[in-house]
Amino acid sequence: MNRRKIFDLSVTLAPHMPVWPTHPTVEIVPTGIASRDGYSIETLSFSTHTGTHVDAPYHFDERGATVDRLELSVLVNDGYCLSPPLRGKEITAEAIKSLWKPEYDGATILFNTGWSKKRAFTREFLYDFPGLTLDAAQFLLDHKVRLVGIDTLSIEPYEHKDFHVHKLLLGAGAAIIEDLYGLDQLQQGKRYTVAALPLKIQGASGSSARVLAIEE
């Protein structure tokens, strides 16, 4: 049997884990305990954009697709991991272009900045992370990318108060994966099958997701 390697690119959800600065912290409360009740069960409380998650177009576009309406062909697709050089806190179109190959067109693109290794309740992790510039987002759209991910809390730097990168990508019908973890497991430029599967929550702007990269 051919056993392909499967890489988990998801953050483990845990109480009081680092999240977007204005979001509620995670609560996971046992409401059934096997030794007491004969079964175990928990209740959960957190934002739909907690941990590794998918942003649907509806996140910034009231007419955009909600997370339950995202096409499976977008969420499960050939994908590549790239580590472009940073310009300060920014990943520019020029940096992406320096690594781009024709086979990346139309694929899922995951950006490895190494930021997940800094994961902690520190100002650096929560506020100083890198992300895409507007021209980088446009470059991806020009190359028919419909799902783009990054290992930081946001696809764009925290200083982008107008969320113009989000609005450009989501407004064009693309989806975004944020807060990926462990992208250093992947080889730059190698093709994987990337599966990013959010919960099917009716009318939601996004959802936490289990994201996998499967070796070809």
Image: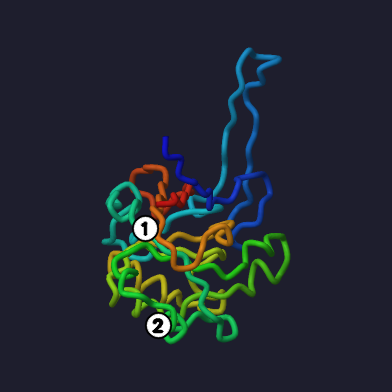
Nearer to the camera, 80 or 160: 80
- Residue 143, disc: none
Q: Which colour scheme is used?
A: rainbow
Q: Residue 99: percent from the left, percent from the top?
A: 43, 78
Badge 2 or badge 1: first in the primary sequence = 1
- Left or right, 32 with respect to 104, comes to right
Q: Quadrant of the N terminus?
A: top left
The residue positioned farthest toward the front in the image shown? 1
Q: Name the residue under label 2.
A: 97
Q: Residue 59: percent from the left, percent from the top?
A: 39, 61
Q: Nearer the viewer, mark 2 or mark 1?
A: 2
Q: Residue 192: percent from the left, percent from the top?
A: 41, 56
Nearer to the camera, 109 or 68: 109
Residue 199 in which image quadrant: top left
Q: What residue type is labelled 1?
A: Ala
Name the element at disc 1.
Answer: loop
Marks 1 and 2: in contact by CB < 8 Å?
Answer: no
Determine whether 84 is above or below 8 in the image: below
Q: Residue 43: percent from the left, percent from the top?
A: 57, 33
Determine whether 86 is above or below 57 in the image: below
Name the element at disc 2.
Answer: helix
Q: Name the residue under label 1.
A: 56
- Left or right, 26 with respect to 56, comes to right
Q: What residue type is labelled 2?
A: Lys
Residue 58 in which image quadrant: bottom left
Going 32% across and 53% down the picture, which residue do you hit?
A: 66
